[in-house]
Image (tube, rainbow, N blue to C red):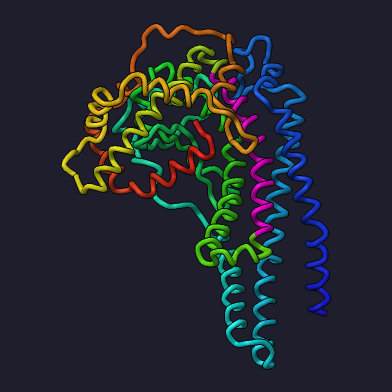
């Protein structure tokens, strides 16, 4: 009875999953063609300022249909992945039992059998370890309390009121250029409800943006809450992390032998198919969030903010990380303010021609169907000439902080303490093409 049940399970998986993988790949390609930047122009309201309500941008019927199809496909992708896990675990278990049976029966060489046991054990451990992957750990930055930075919190509250949504509960200041939001939830995958809305602010971006430009970026980030992106992104991230962690464990422990592992090839194919499908959905949501920003703060303001974060802030971040890497390598910890030293380095060493070259490379970046974000050029083209607003005050966003120098020193200490983890997370961040 047990043997027949296992046989049916494997037969069903063998017949179903090749079809499902092909279906995900085909649908990912088709859907990505429907969510290109120029298509987003077709979905804009005649008066985009009137399209904001309840923290979200109104969508056309076609746009809602595409979003619902995407969400249905993603949820099915998550469901079928977790349904495959018992089979993935059974493969090494059955191979291991068969190997033990061969050893005790006297069949096969002991060396080969022990080697096969090691391979099957590695397969099993890789899947189990991947199931309990929950990120690299550590805070995304220095937590900032409302009482310590009241001006910054008041500004985020004002943006929340403009886009008609609930304000941020927590702010983290990060050493680099990233600006993003996330939400923490109660229970597995946050299924028991929302706990906190959090915002991560990169110090390099605060140094390059004006207050109005910063507000336009925040309006974009708040839109991710209003459109429900942070909820589904938690699920997507956990599935991707599980597969990536499993594949990484196989590579570290199995070496080239992983190429003989059927579980490895299944995960590679599923990872790519799922990544393709979720990337298209993510890009479409980025365009939608961009529309929130230009509806409230104007396209020219948001365009300047977008280009600054993707160029000036990233150049500053790259120089900062490079200088910090040199300091760590040389064990030179005399400088307490990495940002102050970095500004001196950029003004004296980094000539304008090199800076312009870096700008051109960043702005002219080519998109990929696996990118979670459109390129800067695609986003700028999609919002061109819509609801222009003039930034007359030009106040620097970093002035929102109570004590900039003290904050820079605190972030410098944080950067040095978490340097290795931050470098890895930044590599992952920019590979995902997030700005």
Would residue 49 be counted in the magenta stretch?
Answer: no
Direction from residue 80 to residue 301 in the image, left or right: left
Q: Is residue 267 magenta?
A: yes
Residue drawn at the location 22% of the way across and 31% of the way down = 341
Quadrant in which residue 148 is drawn: top left
Q: Is residue 431 above or below residue 41?
A: below
Q: Is residue 50 or residue 394 the one in the foreground? A: 394
- Image position of 79 (left or right of 388): right
Rendered location of residue 283, percent (x, y): 62, 31
Q: Is residue 235 above or below residue 393?
A: below
Residue 122 versus residue 204: which sits nearer the camera?
122
Q: In the image, is residue 264 above or below residue 6?
A: above
Q: Which residues are magenta?
A: 265-293
Q: Tell me if I can see residue 151 in this picture.
A: yes
Q: How many marks?
A: 0
Q: Position of residue 293 (x, y in %)?
A: 54, 20
**Residue 49 at x, y percent in the picture:** 60, 12
Residue 234, percent from left and from top:
57, 45
Residue 159 makes an appearance in the image: no
Q: Is residue 234 above or below residue 153?
A: below
Q: Give the overall secondary structure of the magenta segment.
A: helix
């Amino acid at each position: 009875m047990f043997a027949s049940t296992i046989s049916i399970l494997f037969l069903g998986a063998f017949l179903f999953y090749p079809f499902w993988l092909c279906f995900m790949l085909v649908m990912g390609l088709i859907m990505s063609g429907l969510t290109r930047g120029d298509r987003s122009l077709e979905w804009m309201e005649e008066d985009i300022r009137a399209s904001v309500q309840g923290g979200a941008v109104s969508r056309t019927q076609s746009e809602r249909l595409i979003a619902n199809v995407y969400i249905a496909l993603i949820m099915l992708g998550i469901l079928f992945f977790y349904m495959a896990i018992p089979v993935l675990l059974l493969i090494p278990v059955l191979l291991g039992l068969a190997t033990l049976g061969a050893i005790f029966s006297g069949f096969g060489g002991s060396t080969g059998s022990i080697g096969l046991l090691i391979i099957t054990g590695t397969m099993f451990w890789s899947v189990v370890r991947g199931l309990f992957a929950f990120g690299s750990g550590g805070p995304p930055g220095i937590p900032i309390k409302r009482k310590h930075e009241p001006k910054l919190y008041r500004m985020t509250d004002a943006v929340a009121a403009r886009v008609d949504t609930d304000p941020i509960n927590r702010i983290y200041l990060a050493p680099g250029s990233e600006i993003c939001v996330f939400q923490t939830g109660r229970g597995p995958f946050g299924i028991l409800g929302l706990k906190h809305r959090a915002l991560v602010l990169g110090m390099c971006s605060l140094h390059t943006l004006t207050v109005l430009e910063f507000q336009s970026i925040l309006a974009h980030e708040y839109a991710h809450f209003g459109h429900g992106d942070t909820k589904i992104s938690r699920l997507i991230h956990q599935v991707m992390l599980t597969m990536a962690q499993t594949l990484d464990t196989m590579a570290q422990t199995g070496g080239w032998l992983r190429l003989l592992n059927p579980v490895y090839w299944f995960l590679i194919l599923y990872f790519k198919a799922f990544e393709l499908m979720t990337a298209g959905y993510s890009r479409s949501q980025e365009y939608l969030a961009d529309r929130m920003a230009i509806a409230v703060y104007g396209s020219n303001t948001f365009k300047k903010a977008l280009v600054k974060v993707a160029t000036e802030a990233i150049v500053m971040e790259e120089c900062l990380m490079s200088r910090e890497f040199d300091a760590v390598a040389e064990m030179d910890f005399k400088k307490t303010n990495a940002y102050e030293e970095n500004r001196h380095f950029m003004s004296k060493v980094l000539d304008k021609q090199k800076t312009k070259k870096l700008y051109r490379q960043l702005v002219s970046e080519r998109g990929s169907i696996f990118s979670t974000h459109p390129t800067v050029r695609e986003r700028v083209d999609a919002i061109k000439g819509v609801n222009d607003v003039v930034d007359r005050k030009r106040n620097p966003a970093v002035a929102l902080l109570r004590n900039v120098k003290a904050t820079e020193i605190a972030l410098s200490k944080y950067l040095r303490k978490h340097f290795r983890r931050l470098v890895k997370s930044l590599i992952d961040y920019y590979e995902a093409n997030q700005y």
